Amino acid sequence: MLLIHCPYCRMARPESEFRYGGEAHVVRPAEPANVSDADWAAFLYMRANPKGIHAERWRHVHGCGRFFNALRNTVTDQILRTYPAGTPQPALDAHAEDGR
Amino acid sequence: MAGLHRTNGGGRIDRKKRLSFTFDGKSYEGVAGDTLASALLANGVHLVGRSYKYHRPRGILSAGAEEPNALVAVDRGDGRSAPNLRATQVELYDGLVAESQNRWPSLAYDVGAVNGLFSPLLAAGFYYKTFMGPRLLGSNWAWHKIYEPLIRRAAGLGKAPTQPDPDRYANGFAHCDVLVVGAGPAGLAAALAAAESGARVILCDEQAELGGSLLSEWSIEIDGVPAAAWLAEAVRTLAASPRVTLLPRTQAFGYFAQNFVALAERLTDHLAKPEPSAPRERLWQVRAKHVVLATGAIERPVVFPDNDRPGIMLADAARTYVNRYGVRCGSRAVVVAACDSGYATALDLRRAGVDVAMIVDPRPSGGSAVSGAVKAAGIAVETGATVIATRGRQRVSAVQIGRATSGTWVRCDHVLMTGGWTPSVHLFSQSRGKLAWDEAAQAFLPASVAPGQSQRSVGACRGAFGIAAALEDGFAAGGEAVGWAARARDFKVASDVADFSGVLGASNPGAHESKAFVDFQHDVTVRDLKLAAQEGFRSIEHVKRYTTTGMATDQGKTSNLNALAIVADHLGKPVPAVGLTTFRQPYTPVTFGTIAGASRGDLFDPVRRTPCDGWAQAVGAVFEDVGAWKRARHFPEGSEDMHAAVARECRIVRSAVGMFDASTLGKIEVVGPDAAEFLERLYINPFQKLGVGRCRYGVLLNEAGFIIDDGVIGRIAADRFHVTTTTGGAARVLNMMEDYAQTEFPELKVWLTSTTEQWAVIAVQGPKAREVLAPLVEGVDLDATAFPHMSVKAGRICDVDARIFRVSFTGELGFEINVPADYGAAVWEAVWREVQKHGGCAYGTESMHVLRAEKGFIIVGQETDGTVTPDDVGLGWAIGKSKRDFVGLRSLSRPDIVRSGRKQLVGLLTADPKLVLEEGAQVTAEAKPRVGTPALGHVTSAYWSAKLGRSIALALVADGRARIGARLNIPMPSGDVSVDVVAPVFLDPKGERLNG
Ligand SMILES: [Zn+2]
């Protein structure tokens, strides 16, 4: 079981308190009516599936209830950073994967 | 003396405490401190099992968790039967009842040994070649009818118990600074160092006693005292530290991310009369800041022909039996030592009175340091030779020692072999650490710790062999774990073995490689492995699956490295080029009880019951599961079956009045100045202009435009809505609302609260509904004009504050009374008394389904399946026409949604009115469609309608609305059924009853 740091509760909590929410930073178009069929289909269905760092949404569903984003390495399963929803994806420094 | 083969003194047993036990029905005696294996050996019993495929007689190979052969079933009665236990780990208690496995009718005369005759058929890949490709054998009749059933029955391990497990299992979470796995010299030293700093330490070990290899040491001295005295002092020190937890009988079996380690503690299996209420095992889930793995090493067998006869064992196991348990495994031994540790074994056996006929060392120059002591003891040493054949039916009686194909026979009654030591890197590998091949050690050793883990391997499991090295390595790691930079300690160890190197792979199997066993538990031989390589398998992962080597319950603890070396040798590649198979949890088998803990029976899954549940139970309702809820399905009277009860309930609702427990409906309170705007953006319906006190039937889509939920939404105040959802959708809808409120529309001031369990909901439906409620309510005018359909009022009922909705899911005049859950049962009974006065009844979910289907009301998840739009089910009218956006709107104009030919909701009437269709049945145009003809759609709901006196059905049919009036077909196995397509409303299409 992973420990996940909730950026709102500011503490690491067990994975079982959280629910996965899919890829982060997928922006819903402000004016869907003006979006082409192709772009709308991409918004609905096209998702990244990287080997390595993945920005993804989590919800502290059995805690504060808030949605937030996490950077997770899909190879090592390490969550390297968590940050509030609506804030930009942070840059990772070179030592982020040391596990500290 | 308990057992003829017991020494007179020494060891860690209590010779005065006699324990009686049975094995295969025969009585024996052992002593306190014995394992089942040591007690059997003390009685001269070597034959303890039959092998998996060939049913060859097998004896005890090892003295620990790695045992592949000596698997037994222990029966404690009352369903307490545990199969596949390693006799080497079963602690003896008075009255223990053990049985051997995989033999019939008895161990000594096993019919299944005939499998040995089929051994050419059972070679590598036989599962694939025979079971999956029967034609390879030519005429396959005999195979299917005779051989395969025979082999399948004969091959196998223990039998699972058939009764429920009566035992209780505990579960605990623990946190510590340092978790030390393994209490041998390295682990003890690590725990001592960490404990000295005051850190919280957990030290676990799979054995009953802490000490690991020190428990089997006879002559070694540590810091000037005998090993046993040093061990006792170390354990005393640790036990006296309040921040140290010692867990003997505790196997660390899984190492997961972020230093999360699972331990299984055996609590009562070693007791003759355990406290009946005591848990049998406990699962520890430990989160450690730092983990020290001190898991030791496992001795490798030597691979020579017929190396599996009972009496042929690992050398260090024999040393453990004689030093720790005071048991001589025989009177005359041949030691096959490809590692110096075998020489130490020979000396210890000689000291205990065993006649050591010879040491055979396959290494050309033999052992180094200890060989002098062996020669001084007068033991003959033959170097550069090995065993080329063995004799003995149920126990080895002689071995042939030679260099090629000829040699001399030496009489013996046990053979002790050591091919060297394989570091136990299982847990390290489970932690995703990277292993690297170490050429000098001829072993895979921990190379780099996985990111996110804080961990060190110490002692033999990382190639630091010998007691002095293990102590020093462990002490340094234990100190480092608590932040001591360089606090080393020297340990003075006398008579330590210095060189632990050995040999890998086959030891001159010659022409008999089909009988040179590598994996004892799965009967995999040198020949099987070579065959796999010859047939083109190159990766060890493929060889493993093809030959099943390493795939038995022991996961190849004694065999994997030999198998790897044999394949590498055959392919002419270095060992690391062939790869290494994955180490998987659990390290040793773990009971399902330990994993499940308390989560079984009633506690397996939470059950949700409504406030009115007790009443429904008392009147004999029949319940069904809806998600985690128990819902009353129908209320049978007398001997009514469901069909009769539902027909009666429906008739009474239509003619008088019925009451229904709707408390399971999901309920969300949506509050805030932007509440209306929020709902406007989520649901397809308009909400801004909905008046206070009015309700709307809301339909919720996902962004792809498909219906995912529905429910009535009432406006309680300008800034407050009472939203209802489907029973199963409550959590999903709240999660979706939170998602949009937090991440898409954070600018909206809106707050969401689940109120599902705060309200009890009593639906009162039928022409007499108003009369039922009139005497009970206060401050609410129930008159049709004052309180029209689709409105909500706050008021009181039975002196309780209530929200009363005038809504109908039956098509009748109806109300839904919401009262605080704590008053639900009392209000239900008050309403029930009024309902009875009007000849009414309680109705369940089955009648609710029929009543709504008569009106053509959909159920999300029944008429919809995640690919259905509002227009598909005739709900296009609900869409707010002036809305610029809501969740899913854009998708409703996608090409696939606006094309013709989409499936649409229609009603179906069978030509035979008595026939009720099957839900899920396919709808076709022709009566007898050709195979492969695509269906036009399917039946979503089908019921008997008592009101209409005939069957009705709802269906999704391509271009359904254009087909109204047409005749279609339902092909069924019993024959085609003709149906007429009609509008999906069977009763009161104008809604006169509901507006009454
Ligand atoms: Zn939180």
Image (cartoon, coloured by chain):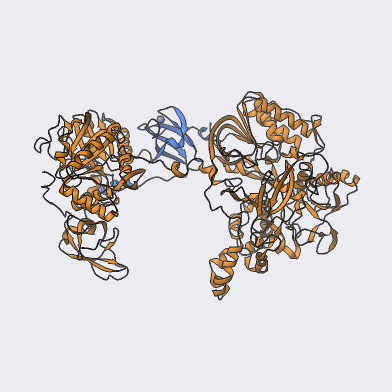
Quarter in which the N terminus of chain B is drawn: top right
Q: Using residue B206 as the reference point, say whether residue A97 is left or right of it.
A: left
Given residues B760 and B542, the one toward you in this image is B760
Q: Quadrant of ligand 1?
A: top left
Foreground residue among B160 and B483: B160
Of the 4 image quadrants, the one containing the C terminus of chain B is: top left
Asked whether the viewer can see residue B100, the reply is yes
**Nearest the eye: B731 or B330:** B330
Residue B594, by quadrant, is: top right
Chain assigned orange? B
The mark total stands at 0
| Residue B515 lies in quadrant | bottom right
Judge left or right: residue B968 versus residue B300: left
Instruction: Tell me residue B439's x, y (percent).
Output: 70, 46
Q: What is the x, y in percent for residue B898?
A: 21, 53
Q: Position of residue B535 (x, y in %)?
A: 61, 65
Residue extending furthest toward the bottom = B139
The residue lying furthest to the front in this view is: B638
Query: Residue B282 location in percent, x, y?
Result: 56, 38
What's the colour of chain A in the image?
Answer: blue
